Image: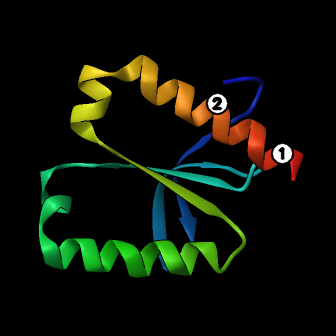
Amino acid sequence: MLGFRFRRQHPIGPFIADFYCADAGLVIELDGGIHNEQERQKQDKLRDKAINDHGLETLRFDNRDIETNLEGVIEIIKKKLRERVRT
């Protein structure tokens, strides 16, 4: 995507990122229905903070977004990639 390479199931500290782009410092997480549960959302926020503490940024997408609006998701990722490499 835009010449960036992503690693799948990449370890970051004690976590495994669904997708990781080292050049942009970007983590992409694809979340299933369990992530809608309140306790899981708290865990995700703590996880995102820990990942952000490594200087990375996390984008989360619900699986339904992938299934129903893949082009929109890809555009969001491209925009974030451009922003991350500019700064």
Residue 44: horizontal and vertical position, in percent?
Answer: 34, 72
- Image color mode: rainbow
Label 1 crowding class (10 Å Cα cut-off): few <14, some 14-19, many 20+?
few
30 sits left or right of 21 in the view? left
Q: Give the residue displayed 30% in from the left and 79% down from the top.
A: 43
Residue 87: horizontal and vertical position, in percent?
Answer: 87, 53
Q: Is residue 35 above or below residue 14?
A: above
Q: Which of marks 2 and 1 is nearer the N terminus?
A: 2
Please say whether residue 35 is visible from this viewpoint: yes
- Residue extending furthest top? 71
**Location of mark 2 (residue):** 78
Q: Is residue 4 above or below residue 70?
A: below
Residue 76: horizontal and vertical position, in percent?
Answer: 54, 33
Spatial distance from mark 2 to mark 1, Cα to Cα? 11 Å
Please name the amino acid that badge 1 sits on: Val
Q: Which element is circle 2 on?
A: helix
Please say whether residue 23 is visible from this viewpoint: no
Q: Is residue 77 above or below residue 35?
A: above
**Location of mark 1 (residue):** 85
The residue closer to the viewer here, 68 or 11, is: 68
41 sits left or right of 70 in the view? left
